[in-house]
Structures are given as C-alpha cells and as structure tokens.
Amino acid sequence: MDLSLTAKFDVRVTADNPNDKIGIYYEKGGVISVWYQGTSLCVGPIPRFYQGHRNVTRLHVALAGRNQYGSAVMSAIQQQQATGRIPLELRIHAPVAVKLGALKMRKVKVLGKCLLVVDSLSSSSKIRIQASDCNFKLKL
C-alpha cells in the first residue's frame, strides 16, 4: 500500500520593484517551496526574467511534491482543516542580480519566508490566505 502524500500547488507571486533606477535580473536556480510543520510538501522553479524599474510582475509557479510519510502529514492537515486554519510556510530562494543604469552588479540571493494561515487545502476550492507574515533577506 502506498501511503505517500502527493501535493500540487499553483502559486501566484507578485514581485514589485518600485525603484525608478534599479532593474532586477531573476537568475536560473530560483525555487519556491511549501512546508507544513517542518515537512516539505512541494517545490517548483521560479522562471528567469528581468524586472525593469517601476514594474510589477505577476508569476504563476507550479509546485509539486511527494512525501513518503504522507499518512501522518495528511492526518495532521485534516485535523487543521476541520478548524479552517492550516499553518503553512512558503520559502523562496531566488538568485538575483541588480542592474543600475548600464551596470549589472554581482549576484546575490534573496531568501524569503512567509508564514501563512490558509482556510483549506481542498482541490475543489480556491485557497484563501487568512493571515501572513513575510520576511526577506539578502545573502551575499
């Protein structure tokens, strides 16, 4: 019997660059992952793109994953779903390079973590975020 858990998410991310002099190159190797209580549920690649100054870019990132200890994780998620409040962690790892005028600077990593509370993980309904707390930092 296969007790693994398969998870698929279609994540919509909005990247806002309000600066009027700096562009951002999102380089190869960026990933977004979703975690539940320290267990990775799914992961997906962030596409490479250039974000110009004063630009808002909307991305759709498909995440998929499989966990071999799925029955325990699924049981815990179902208990949380009954309350209508499921805690998740969204992690972002994005190598970026900043463009200032004609000069492209060295690559840095943007590391992000968003603690989310969602109402449901049902595939038959849209997931609503009830609470979020996001932090980002640069790593040289």
Image (cartoon, helix red, strand yellow):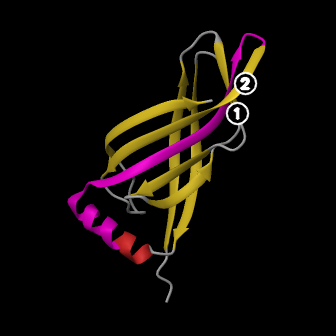
- Where is residue 90? Give x, y as percent: 46, 47
Q: Which residue is mark 1?
A: 49
Q: Which residues are magenta?
A: 75-102
* The C terminus, quarter of image: top right
- Where is residue 59? Give x, y as percent: 58, 39
- Using residue 61 as the reference point, say whether residue 97 is left or right of it: right
Q: Residues within 10 Å of mark 1 (few under 14, many from 20)?
A: few
Extreme bottom residue here? 1
* SS category of the residue bearing label 2: strand
Asked if the stretch drawn in magenta spans residue 37, the answer is no
- What's the mark number on residue 16? none
Q: Which residue is mark 2?
A: 106
- Where is residue 42? Give x, y as percent: 53, 59
Q: Residues within 10 Å of mark 2 (few under 14, many from 20)?
A: few
Extreme left residue here? 83
**Residue 39 placement: quadrant:** bottom left
Task: Look at label 1 and name its amino acid.
Answer: Phe
- Using residue 72 as the reference point, say whether residue 82 is left or right of it: left
Of residue 15 and residue 109, the one placed in the foreground of this image is 109
**Residue 131 placement: quadrant:** top left
